[in-house]
Every structure is written in structure tokens, then in C-alpha cells.
Image: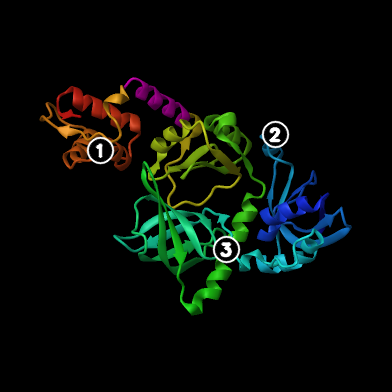
Amino acid sequence: MARVLRIGFDSPEEFQREYAENLAKGGVFVATDERCELRERVKVVLALLFCDEKLALSGEVVHCMTADMVAAGGTAGVAVQFDGSTHAVRKMLEPLRQAAGAPEHQQADPGRRRSPRTDARVSARIDGGDGPIAGHTRDVSQTGVLVAVPGKGVPVGERVSLTITHPTSGESKQVEAVVAREVDSEAGVTALGLDFAPADHDREALASFIDGIQRVEHARRLGGIRGDVAELGIQHLLQMFTTTARAGTLTVKHGELEGLIGFEGGLLRYVKLGPAGGMKALTRLLDWSQGSFEFHAELDPVEELEAPLPLEAALLESARLEDELTRIDLRRFPDEGVPRVVGEPDEELSKLEAAVLDLARVGFPVQRILEVIPEPDAQIYGVLAALTDRGVLAL
């Protein structure tokens, strides 16, 4: 006998809100103190308490909120992914939706009149332009995707080949697409919006593949913890989550920028912020005082993992780099300023010094130098200051 879990809705508005946010996407988070097992088969009874309507849906437990995660701010319960496609789930939910007062003229399946986007971090590769670009999706829909890219853009309107990898099965799907927009920031191009342009014979298979990704990714995030960065700060969030979860991904957003921090077993596995990674990205993220965060207790796939680094060691190194920055008068090096080579080095250059000097020779501004060179910003500013003081560079 499958375990039975229950959710009651006290008002039409409460049900309609849950329908739009979760139920229509193929899953739901059930607040409960019952101890369920991952992959356990369950039945979820949805009860409209205001009109005595009920519906039971079968599904599978895809996430359990641990006691440690509850202590960190989560809600005790489990995430359940319903059986069947999202279209089939919406069709089964239609009687409840009508009982909750959905307008008669409104279509039952919102996916037929618009293409809702689902937050999703799955591996993606764009082939076209000047060569392949490896990245990961930020969201997916039935009509297109937003792909995070490492500072490399593709002209809007260009036709490309996009390969997406399913997060659980590992299956890859290749589809023709058109670049619809570039997401720009001070760091350059951080994401590309792509519209699918599949051949007619491939449309149905693509729709099924995207539906599967949306269902899995939505279910993974049902038990996540969300909030404002300003409340605790990114450093405290990291320390809290790494002590309460064996693995996880902290996603931080501020405007068009999105940062990812993945950890496993108390070790940082990657840090991404636009084209920046590693300590460079971590130091920048720890400086954020505004934005929103989302945490879930799984390591999101990215294009490449970094060398594992103990969290506390990374935080100490970041603090040291931040201290180095405070010792440099950054007003000497405005972002738009262009360093000029005005003298010859009086001693052998380090690799970093040589890289800065090469970029200065071709006319790169300070901001571009910071983005092109992977070393932390504090080290680059330190080299700019040293070369300027030695009379090799001038601004």
C-alpha cells in the first residue's frame, strides 16, 4: 500500500496560487512530519476544504527535507513528482481547478497558450559563430532556453546548434536554434536567449524532452530554501548550508547577474559568476549585499568542476584578497580607464604581469583586463599598481 499524504486548501485563492506555482508543473511540496524514503511511491490527496472536492494523484518522492535543513530555515516535508506528463497532470487537475472558480473561457492547459519557463541548471553546448561555447541553462521552456555563457556572445539572429543534456538520464538532445537576445553586464555577455527552430519531424520529440527536463528540475527545487541575501549575507549562508547538507547548490541573483556555488562533502566544487570562476567569482559574490538566493540540497551539473577546496580555506583566502584590495587606491584605476605602456620593465616579469602588459599594449580598459585574466581582482589590481609605480604603465 502506498503511503497517503494530504494537502488541504482553505480558499480558492490558495489552491489557484499553488496550481500556478507548482501543481501545473507536475509536482508539489507536502509539508509533513512523516519520514518518507527517497523514490518512495506515494499518493497525494488534494482537498479543497472550501467545497469538499478531492483528488488523489500518484507520484514519487524526489526530495526529503532533513532535520538539519529544517533547522537551517526549511520546512519539514517531501517533494513529490506526479506520474505522467505535465499535460496529463493538468488534465487530471482540471476538475479541482474549475471547482476553485477558474473562468470558463480560460483554457485548462496554460502550456497551450503560453510557454512557461522553469528554472533549470542543465549542461548545454552552443555550436556556431566562432566555435563551440560550453555553458549551462538558467531556464527552459517549450520554445527556448536561456543559457549562461562565459563572457562569449553570438550575434542576435544567428542560427546555431544547441545540445542539451537531461540532468538524470544523461540523454543529450540536439536542436537548431536562433539567438534571440544577449544578456549583458559589466562582465560582458553572461547569457544567451535562444529560440528553438526544430525541423517539423523533431518537434514532438523535442517537446517531450523539454517537458521531462522541466518536471525533473521543478521537482528538485520544490523543497528548496529561498530568501534575501541582505538578511544573512552569502558567507553566513554558505557556512550554514555546508554544515547542514552533504551537498548542495546556492544560486544567487542580482539583476541580470547569476552566481552559482556548488559544494559536496564540505568542499567547494565550483563557483561561477558570468565568465569568472573559482576564487575570483567567490570574492566578488561575497561582496554582494543585495539580491535573492535559492538553495537546494543537490549539486547542480555545470560544464566543468574545479579543484575541490575546503570551504573555510576558501573563505579565509577570500578575506585575504579583500584585505589586499582595501590597501590599493582603486580610484587610480577606473573601469573605463585604458592603461598605456610608457616604459620598459626593469626586471623579469611574472606571468600575471606579462599578461596585464600584453593586454595594455592592445588597448584593453581596466574592466576588460579584469574579465579576461582569470586571477582574482585583487592580484590584478596589485599588478596594475606595481607596474604603474615602476613607470611601466600610466593611466
Pinpoint residue 377: horizontal percent, then vertical percent.
Answer: 34, 33
Report the front residue among 140 and 111.
111
Q: Quadrant of the C terminus?
A: top left
- Residue with the mark numbered 1: 365
Q: Amino acid at mark 2?
A: Ala
Q: Amino acid at mark 3?
A: Ser
Q: Is residue 382 above or below residue 129?
A: above
- Residue with the mark numbered 3: 115
| Residue depth check, mark 3 versus mark 2: number of the one nearer the observer | 3
Which residue is most to the bottom? 201
Q: Secondary structure at mark 2?
A: helix
Whichever of callouts 1 and 3 sits on the residue coming sooner in the sequence is 3
Q: Quadrant of the N terminus?
A: bottom right
What residue lies at 73% left-to-right and 51% top-to-bottom? 37
| Residue depth check, mark 1 versus mark 2: number of the one nearer the observer | 1
Judge left or right: residue 200 versus residue 395: right
Q: Is residue 85 visible?
A: no
Q: Secondary structure at mark 1?
A: loop
Judge left or right: residue 53 versus residue 118: right
Q: Is residue 379 above or below residue 88?
A: above
Magenta extent: 313-328
Magenta: main secondary structure equals helix
Whichever of callouts 3 and 2 sits on the residue coming sooner in the sequence is 2
Residue 71 got which mark?
A: 2
Q: Residues within 10 Å of mark 2 (few under 14, many from 20)?
A: few
Hey, which quadrant is residue 368 in on the image? Answer: top left
Q: Is residue 197 above or below residue 249?
A: below
Pinpoint residue 145: horizontal percent, then vertical percent.
Answer: 49, 59
Q: Residues within 10 Å of mark 1 (few under 14, many from 20)?
A: some
Q: Secondary structure at mark 3?
A: loop
